[in-house]
Image (spheres, rainbow, N blue to C red):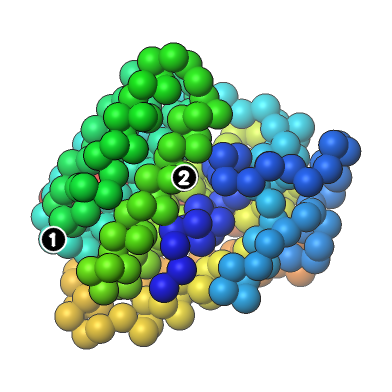
Amino acid sequence: MRSLTAFFALVPAFLLLATAESTSGDQPPRHIDVGNGSLPATLIDDVVVPLPGEVFAALDKIGSPDWHDVLRSTKPQMERRPQIALLLGTVIAEGFIAVEAKDAEQVKKIGRDVLTLANALNVRKSVIERTKSITDAADERDWPKVRDELDKASHDVSQAMDEMQSATLSQLVSLGGWLRGTEALTEVVGRNYSKDGAELLHQPALLDYFQKRLGAMDKHTKNDELVGMIEKRLPEIRPLISAPKGDIPAKSVDQIHSITEDLVKAVNSREM
C-alpha cells in the first residue's frame, strides 16, 4: 500500500501546494488539461497527476479565490471506523484550505481534530508530535511549515495503517480527502465560472481509481451504509467530468458540487 502521499496527489491538486513545488518559474498555461501533459505531472498508481504547485498557480491566475469563503468548520461525529476514516480525510483536506485562508485558529482546531480521529483509529501515536508542530507553526504563521507538517501527518497515518494492515481504512481516508477537495474546487470554479477553471475537474482517471478501490473492498466495509452510498453516487460524477477536450459546462460543475456536497455532509452526519 502506497503512503498517503498518493492521497494528497489524488485530492484535487489545487489543495496540495505543500506536497510538491513547481518545476518551472514560467507562468502556468492559460489552457489547462490535466490529462494531456499541459502541466508537469507525476504518476500515482498509473494515474497521471499534475504537480500541485502548477495547478494551484493556474487556478489562482484564473480566479484568485477567497479561501475563507470555502473553509468549513469541522465537527467530527465519530461513529463507525469507515466513517471515521472518511472523516479524517475530509479534515486533513480542510487543513490545506485553512492554510490557504491563513486562518491560524482553524488550523489549530483541525490539528486537534486530526489527533482525535487518529486516536479513534488507533494511530494516535503516529501523529501526536506532528499535530503539536502544526499548532506551533500556525501560532508563528509559518504557513509553508504548516503545509509540510500536514503532509507529513498524512504520511505518518498511512504508515501506521500499513503496519496495522488497514489498507481499506487508508483508502477511505484518501477518498474522504478527494470528496472534500472536489467539493471545494467546484465551489471555487462555480462562483467564477470559466472553461479553464472547470477543466481542472477533468479527472476521470482519478474517479476511476476510487471506484476501483471501492469495488475491491471487503463485503463488511461495502455493506456499511455510508460506504455504499458513496459507491452508488460516484458513477453519477463520471459523465459530468468526461466532456470531450475537458470542456465541462457550468451546469456540470454545479451538479458535481451538489453530489460531493451531499456526500461530505453524509460523512459528517451522525445519522449515517
The front one of 213 and 45 is 45
Residue 202 appears in the rendering = no
Residue at image point 56% right, 56% down:
9
- Give, as a three-letter code, the residue at label 1: Arg
The front one of 101 and 136 is 136
Number of marks in the rendered image: 2
Residue highlighted by disc 2: 151
Going from the N terminus, do you reach mark 1 or mark 2 first?
1
54 in relation to 79, above or below: above
Q: How crowded is mark 1: few (under 14 residues within 10 Å), some or many (20 or more)?
A: some
181 on left or right of 244: left
Residue 212 is situated, as x and y percent measured from the top left of the image, at 45, 80
Q: Is mark 1 on a helix, strand or loop?
A: loop
Q: What's the distance in space between the residues labelled 1 and 2, CA to CA?
A: 25 Å
189 on left or right of 26: left
Residue 41 appears in the rendering = yes
Residue highlighted by disc 1: 80
Residue 38 is situated, as x and y percent measured from the top left of the image, at 83, 57
Residue at image point 50% right, 29% down:
145
Q: In which quarter of the image is residue 105?
A: top left
Q: What element carries label 2?
A: helix
- Give, as a three-letter code, the residue at label 2: Asp
Residue 54 is situated, as x and y percent measured from the top left of the image, at 73, 44
Residue at image point 34% right, 25% down:
135
